[in-house]
């Protein structure tokens, strides 16, 4: 159509039995459009829904170790971690210290770093091992395909 002052735009909208919808209020002068407001809201919701559907949901899988986890159990859990990363999920590996086993903090850290090294083909470490209370946690994110 064209550029009109607010009063004139409102008159035109009334003549056409439509609504005057403000599209961009921060522009100078503000941008408005003559249209059906309900249709505008419907289109906006439709766009938002489409964007929401495209957004990926982050799945976090957990693997729990003890400070004295033996090799067979470690290999078994490493295979699970590998599978989770291949499927595109984040991996949260942690060592849980029960009772007095907290004296083996270094063993727990070595275990997690070994896991990070073994899984470096499938993902990269997002957060290095960090002790939080009775558990030492590490996050690994999958590598992009």
Image (tube, rainbow, N blue to C red):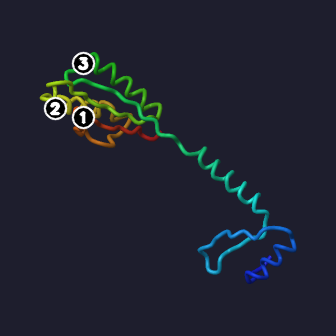
Q: Residue at x 37, y 37 (%)?
A: 123
Which picture quadrant has residue 82? top left
Which picture quadrant has residue 93? top left
Q: Does 24 appear above or below 41?
A: below
- Cβ–Cβ below 8 Å for labels 1 and 3? no
Q: Does 103 appear above or below 144?
A: above
Residue situated furthest top in the rendering: 72
Q: Earlier in the sequence, mark 1 or mark 2?
A: 2
Q: Residue at x 72, y 55 (%)?
A: 43
Q: Residues within 10 Å of mark 3 (few under 14, many from 20)?
A: few
Question: How far is the residue under mark 1 from the one under mark 2?
Answer: 8 Å
- Cβ–Cβ below 8 Å for labels 3 and 2? no
Question: How far is the residue under mark 3 from the one under mark 2?
Answer: 18 Å
Q: Position of residue 141 (x, y in %)?
A: 39, 39
Q: Which mark is residue 67?
A: none
Q: Which residue is mark 1?
A: 136
Q: Which residue is mark 2?
A: 105
Q: Position of residue 78 (x, y in %)?
A: 33, 25
Describe the element under mark 1 as helix, strand or loop: strand
Q: Residue at x 27, y 25 (%)?
A: 65
Q: Residues within 10 Å of mark 2 (few under 14, many from 20)?
A: some
Q: Is residue 72 left or right of residue 31?
A: left
Describe the element under mark 2 as helix, strand or loop: helix
Q: Which residue is mark 3?
A: 71
- Cβ–Cβ below 8 Å for labels 1 and 2? yes
Q: Position of residue 122 (x, y in %)?
A: 39, 34
Please state which of residues 14 and 86 is positioned toward the viewer in this rendering: 14
Which picture quadrant has residue 1? bottom right
Q: Residues within 10 Å of mark 1 (few under 14, many from 20)?
A: many
């Amino acid at each position: 159509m064209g550029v009109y002052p607010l009063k004139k735009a409102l008159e035109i909208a009334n003549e056409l039995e439509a609504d005057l919808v403000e599209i961009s209020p921060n522009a100078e002068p503000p941008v408005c459009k003559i249209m059906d407001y309900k249709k505008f809201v419907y289109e906006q919701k439709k766009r938002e829904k489409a964007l929401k559907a495209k957004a990926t949901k982050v799945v976090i899988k957990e693997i729990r170790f003890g400070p004295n986890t033996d090799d067979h159990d470690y290999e078994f859990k490493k295979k699970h971690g590998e599978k989770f990363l291949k499927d595109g999920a984040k991996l949260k590996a942690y060592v849980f210290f029960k009772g007095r086993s907290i004296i083996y903090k270094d063993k727990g850290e070595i275990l997690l770093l070994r896991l990070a090294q073994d899984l470096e083909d499938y993902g990269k470490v997002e957060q290095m091992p960090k002790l939080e209370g009775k558990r030492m946690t590490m996050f690994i994110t999958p590598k992009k395909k």
